[in-house]
Image (cartoon, rainbow, N blue to C red):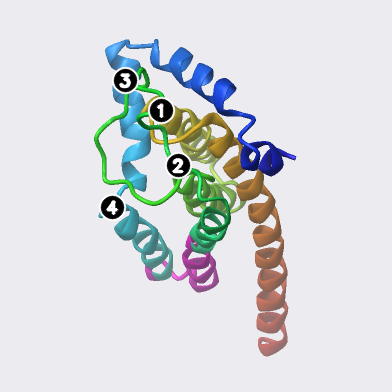
Amino acid sequence: MLFTIVRNRQSAAVDAAITLRLQRRRHPVFNRLMHMVSWPGFPPQSRIIPPALAGTLFAFGYRLEALFQLLAWGSGGISFIFKTIMRRSRPGPDFPEIRIAVARIGGTSFPSGHVLNYIGVYGFLTYLAHTWIHPSLIRRTVVAILGSLLALVGPSRVYLGHHWFTDVTASYLLGFSWLMAFTSVYRRAKRWQVDSWRLRTR
């Protein structure tokens, strides 16, 4: 339904109103936070951090987790497919009152690649942290930090004028649907790995 609304250009007024309302918040701390949250999603760091996370897991002996952490980066492919289909323009000259932060962005607007990549990379990392970190204080701290990153990346993309509200909403819906399926595949692979190890050690 959301895709249909956007495709028929029925969300423009609401999207613009939400962007302008969010951009009225000009407190320096809030402004800095919005820029910081979006920073990991821009190149070159967006091309360095995901494989670095997988490499770190591999170095600590979590080979299956490292493989899935790298594959989680593939959530960007969902963005590419839908961007190709929708071809929606980013905020621009049609709404001159919207402030657009200078950044290395390209392509089309719907859905948000930032949000989809974050849910893939940092969403799966959040799942691993919740599953494998045993000291509860450390686990809760790591999950809270990563969860905050996921929650704030959508608003940050709207605040910076790089995406519309419906762009990030679609990305959250697509991303979390994909993440649930992806973690299900990981759990099955993990069970197979554990069962194979038990058979070998008998």
- Residue at 62% in and 38% down: 6
Amino acid type at circle 1 is Asp
Question: Residue 2 appears in which quarter of the rendering?
Answer: top right
Q: Which residues are magenta?
A: 59-73
Q: What residue is disc 3 on?
A: 31
Q: Is residue 62 above or below residue 181?
A: below
Question: Where is residue 138 drawn, in percent x and y?
Answer: 48, 39
Q: Is residue 169 above or below residue 131?
A: above
* Distance in Å between CA atoms under marks 4 and 1: 27 Å
Q: What residue is disc 2 on?
A: 89
> Which secondary structure lies at badge 4?
loop
Mark nearer the viewer, 1 or 3: 1
35 and 69: which one is in front? 35
- Are dots 2 and 1 in contact, CB under 8 Å? yes
- Residue at 32% in and 46% down: 105
Which circle marks residue 43 in the picture?
Answer: 4
- Residue at 53% in and 32% down: 151
Amino acid type at circle 2 is Ser
**Mark found first going from the N terminus, 3 or 4:** 3
Name the quarter where the C terminus is drawn.
bottom right
Which circle marks residue 94 in the picture?
Answer: 1
Mark nearer the viewer, 2 or 4: 2
**Mark found first going from the N terminus, 2 or 1:** 2
